[in-house]
Image (cartoon, rainbow, N blue to C red):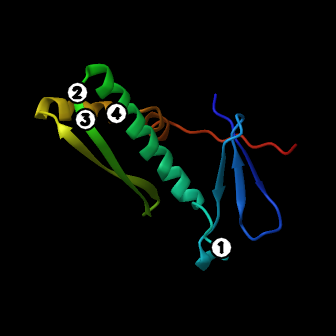
Amino acid sequence: MAAIKASIGTEPYLIEIKSPTGNIVIADEPLEKGGQDKGFSPKELLASSLGACTCATVRMYAERKAWELERIDVNVELVEEEGQTKFIRKIELIGELDEQQRTRLLNVANACPIHKILTHTIVVDTVLV
C-alpha cells in the first residue's frame, strides 16, 4: 500500500507532501491559477508518477537481462479533451538494443504498476476525520 500526507497552510496553494519515510515533495499551482509555481502542479505530479514508474520498471527489466541500455527518457503529457483524460507517453531508449529488445521493453513499460492502475477502474473513497 502506498500512503502519503498532503498538507496546506495559509500560503496560497503551497502543498507539502510527505511519505511515511520522511521524503518531501512540494506541490503548488501555477501563477495563472493564483499559486506561486514553487513545485509541481497536481496534474504534473500525476503525469510524473507514470513517467517515473515507466523508467524504473524498464530499467529493472533491462538490468535483469543485462541489456546495454544507457538511458531511458520518458515524456508524459496529460491531455483532457471531450470528456476523457489521455496520457501521451513517449519513451526513448538509448543504448545498443535490437528491435526485438526494444519491442520487449515497450511491453514491459505498458506493464508498469502505475500504467496498470491508470488503465483499470479507479475508486476514490473519501471520509472526513
Looking at the rendered image, the disc whose residue lies closer to the viewer, 3 or 4, is 3
Q: Quadrant of residue 21?
A: top right
The residue carrying mark 1 is: 36
Q: Residue furthest bottom?
A: 32
Q: Work out whether mark 3 precedes mark 1 in sequence or the reverse, and give the earlier one.
A: 1
The residue carrying mark 4 is: 58
Mark 2 residue crowding within 10 angstroms, few (<14) / some (14–19) / many (20+):
some
SS at badge 4: helix
The residue carrying mark 3 is: 69
Q: Work out whether mark 1 precedes mark 2 in sequence or the reverse, and give the earlier one.
A: 1
Residue, x 47% and y 37% (percent of image)? Answer: 114
Q: Quadrant of the C terminus?
A: top right
| Mark pair 4, 2: CA separation | 11 Å
Q: Work out whether mark 3 precedes mark 4 in sequence or the reverse, and give the earlier one.
A: 4
Q: Inspect this view and state whether residue 63 appears.
A: yes
| Mark pair 1, 4: CA separation | 34 Å
User: Which amino acid is tagged 2?
Assistant: Trp
